[in-house]
Image (spheres, rainbow, N blue to C red):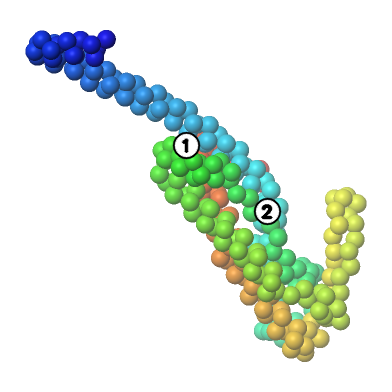
Amino acid sequence: MILQKLAEGIRQQNWFTVFLEILIVVVGIFIGLQVDGWSELRQDRRDEQHYLDRLHDEILNAEKLSARLLDRRIERQGVAADILDAVFVDVERNSLTALECQTVGALHFFNIAVTGLSAVDELTASGRMGILQDTELRAALGALKQAHDATNMYIRIQNGVANDLTHLYPQLISVEAYSDDDLQEIYSRATCDLPAMRKNQAFLNDLSNNADAYDAYIRDGVSPWARQEKRVHDLIDGNLGIQHLEPEE
Ligand SMILES: [Zn+2]
């Protein structure tokens, strides 16, 4: 219809009609584009809310999966330092505590649930990270992905570097597993011979190696990852206006 009128206007050299018809087309296109833009924007806001809710669920789940082991893994780093002190420095001591002895046999354990966030993977794959308006959150999610990859790399590498001392030196450390009926879990208690450990250079080498590998795993892998996960959680809480009650002491 518009094209017909336009052609007729040109034929009759009625420039006012031509101008008017072109103006109608231009204004129509402009309004169409604006409406498209507005509805796209509204959809982005709806999607942003959906993804923030999902990210919150996923991060809660990730924290729950790693919480128990995370505390144990980080605590073990401090115990490793005490062990080195007892073995190499504090010659007055002639035995290790139960916790120290058990830790000697566990410094090659690196497993922990390092869970990724599938909502981030989806947003990245579809090139839609930009719908999250909080630039700080976007940056923090990127850093979390890096920390997550670094931790997985340390788990892989250190597993190949560290040795199972209970298997290599049964005369220096012996382990006995037992079932705890109250907690319904299998635990183990270890017995260590500290004076004999000090005289066995191969053991001292392997212990030093394990302690070093464990320290790097916590310092450069697990700790930065746990800190970043907490940071991301705080930012998501801020975006959603969520406040968690502090756990009771
Ligand atoms: Zn939260």
**CB under 8 Å between callouts 1 and 2?**
no
Q: Position of residue 217 (x, y in %)?
A: 62, 66
**Residue at the extreme front:** 11
Query: For this view, does 1 lie left or right of residue 192?
Result: left
The answer to which of 221 and 91 lies nearer the viewer is 221
Relative image position of residue 1 (x, y in whole percent): 27, 10
Between residues 2 and 77, which one lies in front from this camera angle?
2
Question: For the point 90% across and 61% down, which residue is it?
Answer: 178
Helix, strand or loop at disc 2? Answer: loop
On residue 239, which mark appears?
1
Q: Is residue 214 visible?
A: no
Confirm whether residue 43 shows in the render: yes
Taking the spot 36% from the left edge, 24% from the top edge, the residue there is 36
Q: Report the amino acid beneath label 1.
A: Asn
Could you say which quadrant of the image residue 35 lies in? top left
- 37 is higher (above) or lower (below) than 135: above
Q: Which mark is residue 113?
A: 2
Q: Nearer the viewer, residue 10 or 82?
A: 10
Measure the C-alpha gap from mark 1 to mark 2: 26 Å
Residue kind at label 2, given as amino acid type: Ala
Where residue 216 sits in the image (x, y, percent)? Answer: 60, 70
Residue 76 sits in quarter: bottom right
